[in-house]
Image: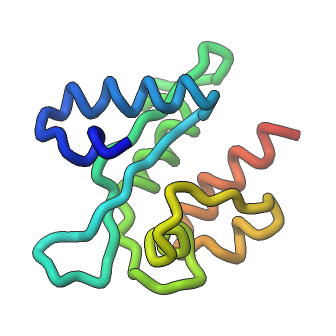
Amino acid sequence: MDAIFLTDDPNTRKLLIGSLAKSFGCVYVCIWSHYFPRPSNYLRSLDGYYNETSQEPSTSSGSLARRLFHEYRQSVIPLQNGHIPSIAFMNNLPYLEISPQDTQRLAYNDAQRHLYQFFMNSNQ
């Protein structure tokens, strides 16, 4: 996992994230880091992987899920305990499992809420 953060090559990072996502069966993985310059009390997406399936309807601008994921990755999230992904980051947790009913409450912004809602609805 550390290799993802240590590599400066974006192509290598994409391969590592994709491999990680596939090995755990994840639809998407978003890697968060401090928002630079330091010191900073914000997180930003360092990189991400989205596994778009062929069953998803798409338009010329791509699938709804991909657009929501892209919008989510553009978020700048304050380091406040009580929000996703800050909870994991502030408590040094490598990952965090959250019940579906808690995702909406713990999301910091609408981009997160829309992404989480999309995936919760598609898994029912």
Give me the residue at 44% from left, 24% from top: 19
Q: In the displayed structure, would residue 101 be above or below residue 80?
A: above
Q: In the displayed structure, would residue 110 be above or below residue 62?
A: below
Measuring from the top left, give residue 34's x and y in whole percent.
26, 69
In the image, is 7 to the left or to the right of 45?
Answer: left
Instruction: Name the residue at the right extreme.
Output: 124
Measuring from the top left, give residue 81's x and y in whole percent.
53, 84
Task: Identify which residue, 1 or 99, lies in the foreground.
Answer: 1
In the image, is 7 to the left or to the right of 49?
Answer: left
How many tags in the picture? 0
Where residue 107 sits, quadrant-wise, is bottom right
Measuring from the top left, give residue 98's x and y in whole percent.
72, 61
Task: Identify which residue, 12 or 1, lies in the foreground.
Answer: 1
Give me the residue at 81% from left, 38% from top: 123
Instruction: Name the residue at the top extreme.
Output: 54
Where's the N terminus, which quadrant? top left
Where residue 56 sits, quadrant-wise, is top right
Task: Identify which residue, 110 or 33, lies in the foreground.
Answer: 33
Task: Identify which residue, 52 or 63, lies in the foreground.
Answer: 52
Where's the C terminus, which quadrant? top right
Measuring from the top left, give residue 101's x and y in whole percent.
83, 66
Say how the picture is coloured. Answer: rainbow
Give me the residue at 59% from left, 33% from top: 27
Give me the residue at 52% from left, 68% from top: 88
In the image, is 10 to the left or to the right of 103?
Answer: left
